[in-house]
């Protein structure tokens, strides 16, 4: 059957091209493009996380106590799993006061959204802090 050899090659080429296009479609689903709307969503997620953490004064208490590990863990709980963050806390003179990294991973080679938040402690010697939260999608 001389004609069946050509049919098999056509069928083989069709299956190979289907496999390649399926792989490309699947990879684009795994790594969606970061659009400006996604970047704005990062800013909203970061602001909401800081507001929620500061709602009852918890954030200022953690900062006053220099409890950076608890701040990090709280942000890990409040932000979605696909978001990387880095937080820097500044005092009234705008000097960084956190002596350890408040982060859940690196922000290298990613599009970063920065959110600033002003937090005040409620004690007798009330202090205010400027928080700079940098966020990026982990994928």
Image: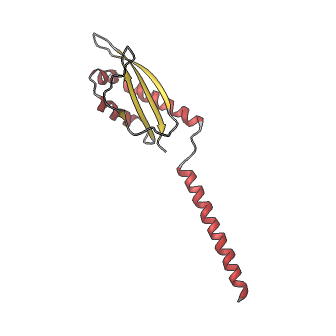
Task: Name the spot of residue 57 as percent of width and height, x first.
Answer: 33, 21
Task: Name the spot of residue 67 as percent of width and height, x first.
Answer: 28, 27
Image point (48%, 37%), residue name: 136
Q: Quadrant of residue 17?
A: bottom right
- List the single residue furthest toward the top: 124
What is the image's colouring?
secondary structure
Q: Is residue 11 left or right of residue 85?
A: right
Residue 125, relative to residue 108: is it above or below? above
Residue 74, relative to residue 7: is it above or below? above
Task: Name the spot of residue 117 as percent of width and height, x first.
Answer: 44, 22
Image point (46%, 23%), residue name: 116
- List the single residue furthest toward the bottom: 1
Q: Is residue 28 left or right of residue 88?
A: right
Q: Is residue 124 left or right of residue 20?
A: left
Number of labels in the image equals 0
Q: Nearer the viewer, residue 138 or 123?
A: 138
Q: Quadrant of residue 21?
A: bottom right
Task: Name the spot of residue 133 as percent of width and height, x first.
Answer: 43, 28
Image point (66%, 71%), residue name: 13
Q: Quadrant of residue 101?
A: top left
Image point (28%, 13%), residue name: 123
- List the single residue furthest toward the right: 3
Quarter of the rendering occupied by the N terminus? bottom right
């Amino acid at each position: 059957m001389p004609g069946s050899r050509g049919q098999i090659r056509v069928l083989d080429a069709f299956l190979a091209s289907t496999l390649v296009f399926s792989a490309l479609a699947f990879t684009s689903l795994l790594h969606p493009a970061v659009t400006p709307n996604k970047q704005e969503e990062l800013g909203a997620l970061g602001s909401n996380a800081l507001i929620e953490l500061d709602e009852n004064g918890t954030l200022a208490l953690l900062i006053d106590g220099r409890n950076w590990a608890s701040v990090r863990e709280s942000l890990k709980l409040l932000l979605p799993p696909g978001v990387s963050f880095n937080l820097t806390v500044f005092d009234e003179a705008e000097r960084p006061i956190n002596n350890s990294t408040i982060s859940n991973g690196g922000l290298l080679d990613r599009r970063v959204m920065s959110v600033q938040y002003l937090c005040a402690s409620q004690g007798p010697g009330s202090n205010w802090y400027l928080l700079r939260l940098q966020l990026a999608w982990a994928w």
